[in-house]
Image (spheres, coloured by chain):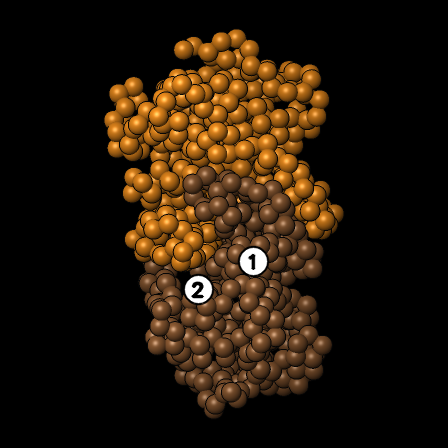
Chain colours: A orange, B brown
Amino acid sequence: MSDQPGDVPLTYAAAGVDIDAQDRALAEVKRLARTTFTRGVLSEIGGFGGLFTLEPENPAGTVLVASADGVGTKLKVAQTAGVHDTVGADLVNHCVNDILVQGARPLFFLDYLATGRLDQGVAIEVVAGLARACVANGCALLGGETAEMPGFYAPGEYDLAGFIVGAVRRDRVLRREAVRAGDALVALPADGLHTNGYSLARKVLFDVLGLAVDSEVPELGTTVAAVLLRVHRSYLEAVAPLVDAGLVRSAAHVTGGGIPDNLPRALPDGLGAEIELGSWDEPALFRLIRRAGQVPENEMRRTFNLGVGMVLVVADEHLGVVLERLVPHGPGWLIGRVVDGPGVRFIGARHD
Amino acid sequence: MSDQPGDVPLTYAAAGVDIDAQDRALAEVKRLARTTFTRGVLSEIGGFGGLFTLEPENPAGTVLVASADGVGTKLKVAQTAGVHDTVGADLVNHCVNDILVQGARPLFFLDYLATGRLDQGVAIEVVAGLARACVANGCALLGGETAEMPGFYAPGEYDLAGFIVGAVRRDRVLRREAVRAGDALVALPADGLHTNGYSLARKVLFDVLGLAVDSEVPELGTTVAAVLLRVHRSYLEAVAPLVDAGLVRSAAHVTGGGIPDNLPRALPDGLGAEIELGSWDEPALFRLIRRAGQVPENEMRRTFNLGVGMVLVVADEHLGVVLERLVPHGPGWLIGRVVDGPGVRFIGARHD
């Protein structure tokens, strides 16, 4: 594709990721996981985090919410650019958001760092990023595993995964069943790609446009590396007080699959969403990728957050106070409404 | 080295793993982690699992014990042999043992499976192994992340990491401070390499001896793959009842670093151990590796479990009942005693 810039529309599947194959395997994985469920399990796999309680009989007992995540191929950008102290923060913040949308605050985090041969300096930079984000989120870095696997990772490459456990009172778990048609959808701004869509973004920026990590991109006002490595934002500080005040019915962390795949996870069966295009600021990076890669709009929406990192589902009577309280954090944008009937529909037009 | 079989003694460092470099980085990692510690943290990094409580004021409150681990280069053997339904059990059992030595029983587990392009069949086999071991250990497979990272992993390769959370009453946490000089050291048999020493074992078996995964090895009575892929044993069923009965003072899971690096983690400062060589059955695989690789004995002990998967520290008055109760599980071997003065000393001679 790099030989024919602009001639072939790029899709995430063409860039090497097959989301449908992932979905099929996920169904069997869920079935297998269900065979292991004990009395403490309160969730099905497929929520943003898994729910477990030590007090199955207590309706107001503490629920532990756990999630596992990786950084994905954003790591490749970091490794090419030689920047290792931001990917840890990406990972912690991603995990924090995954349990936040179920109402939980983080307790502790563990990491898994795997490499061919450990470069101590790199490992310490990675952990420094993890630790900084853990402090910012009030989350203890309780442990981790550093694995040297000779012959498994190419020189200079490593993989990084993380696991978080948070807690929430059982009667305060955010549940999609609380959502009603007519509820407002409030979007929180993303800082760039966060941790999703890097395979496609790299194809377009590096292969189609022939840029390097240190290339200045005038329309982005900075280098490719600076734009691609912007840290996945934690929404804890903005959202936890709203959750504590009972102002949020449900929430979706917009990661792989974008709004179309993630927002329905925060809505009950039978309800969907109408999203008004142009109701939020789409960062210039996404316009560049869309245009240069001739990426179809459906593919853009299923691959990228397009500037929306989290969506809160808010009862209409709370919309005003929620938007007001989000101002110092962001702001928040009213991007649509919950509607009868399943699925996510985009209406109106983008402001390009 | 494969050109000169037998000429060059093999060490773990020569095989690509530098344990000392790992140790130096670990010290800085611990310092960074400490900056994140909140009131709930009850442990320093370096224990087999991290300890966290939601009730810092309650001396009999529930303590969560968490651990992260990978399978390491045992995965390479599994991938070469095309056997994908055992590595999940290796990982779960490894994690279960890591929290068991602190007195905890498992609650839930999450996995991280990363690959270049997802092969659904392989992914499902991996998860089937995880699920089977979770059921056997009464542990819920609560979630996980399957990451497709095109260009990151070679075709047919994947990495697998896991994360476990268990619980124990705070006044029943196994603590090394309870150990006294003269206590008995009771070893539990390992089923092969478990998940450590594979880089060195692969060098010797594949490079020095020129074997393939399907080679029959007469002195081992089976194929290389069958021996190398034996599943890491879970000691939950054997040890948890002893812990519940107050018969165990402390315990060490023998993983990377062998007995010399892991047993001291179960002993207080100022106390060490005397281990009597020949007091347990060393599987034939280790003799083969030692001889064929001309591996120095110190290197063997720091790299492999040598047939001892876990060591329990037991007060002398409980030794009889502990050994008796372990018979159906193993058996247990009295391999030495706790002594004054730090360090692990091996005395006597092996029965070769």
For the residue labelled by badge 1, is the local secondary structure a helix, a strand or a loop?
Answer: helix
Residue ID at (49%, 9%) = A349
| Residue B316 at x, y percent in the picture | 59, 86
In the rendering, at what x and y percent does residue A329 appear? 42, 26
Residue picked out by circle 2: B199
User: Callout 1: 10 Å neighbours few (<14), some, many (20+)?
Assistant: some
Q: Which of pointers 1 and 2 lies earlier in the amino acid sequence?
A: 1
Residue extending farthest to the top is A348
What residue is drawn where x is 46% and y is 55%?
Answer: A144
Q: Chain of mark 2?
A: B
Say above or below: B222 vs A112.
below
Q: Quadrant of the C terminus of chain A?
A: top left
Amino acid type shown at disc 2: Ser
> Measured from the top left, where is residue B268 in percent x and y?
46, 75
Residue found 52% across the figure and 16% down from its top: A335
* Circle 2 SS class: helix
- Is A118 left or right of A103, judged from the image as shown? left
Q: Residue at x 67, y 60 (%)?
A: B137
Q: For the residues marked 1 and 2, what is the alpha-carbon distance in whole angstroms?
A: 16 Å
Q: Residue type at mark 1: give it.
A: Ala
Q: Quadrant of residue A173?
A: top right
Q: Residues within 10 Å of mark 2 (few under 14, many from 20)?
A: many
**Disc number for residue B81:** 1
Is residue B137 among the parts visible in the rendering? yes
Q: What is the number of callouts on the image?
A: 2
Image coordinates of residue B97 in percent, x first then y, are 58, 65
Indicate which label's residue lies in the foreground, 1 or 2.
1
Q: Is residue B36 left or right of residue A98?
A: left
Relative to the observer, which residue lies in front, B29 or A62?
B29
- Chain under callout 1: B
